[in-house]
Image (cartoon, grey):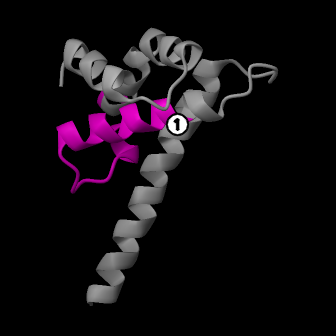
Amino acid sequence: MFISEALSCLRRVEVLTDSQRKLVEENLNLAYWYVNNKQPYIPLQMEYDDCIQEALLSLCNAAVKYDSNSKFSFTTYAIRCISNKFAEHSRRSSRDIRKAN
């Protein structure tokens, strides 16, 4: 998924306010950076496009939940949200593997 496709998907997300949408648009590169540079933290069974999609959805969720009065920058908060999403996915998939055995 290229940035233009991500922007078109973002325009379809109607729960974001204008300020939240602006935060996401300004930080789209975080999702791509995380997926491309944090390979050990991404579950092996996920396809690249799925990883990008999860990262972008996490970025949107971060924009919705971010408190602008926080002492942390949005970038710091968004990276933590993206990281937590992949950690949650890893825990869930490892639990499924144990149940299958």
Q: Quadrant of residue 51?
A: top left
Return the x and y of residue 33 as percentages of the image width and height: 37, 22
Dot 1: element: helix
Q: Main secondary structure of the magenta part?
A: helix
* Front one among 67 and 74: 67
* Front one among 90 and 5: 5
Which quadrant, please, contains the N terminus?
Answer: top left
- Dot 1: few (<14), some (14–19), or many (≥20) neighbours within 10 Å? some
How many marks the image carries: the answer is: 1
Residue 64 vertical placement versus 87 (above, below): above
Return the x and y of residue 37 as percentages of the image width and height: 35, 28
Q: Quadrant of residue 39?
A: top left
**Residue drawn at x 38%, y 30% as measured from the top left:** 13
Residue 45 vertical placement versus 95 (above, below): above
* Furthest residue in direction bottom, as rendered: 101
Residue 86 vertical placement versus 35 (above, below): below
Residue annotated with mark 1 = 61
**Residue drawn at x 41%, y 68% as measured from the top left:** 92
Return the x and y of residue 67 as percentages of the image width and height: 74, 27
Give the magenta-colored segment's residue range: 36-61
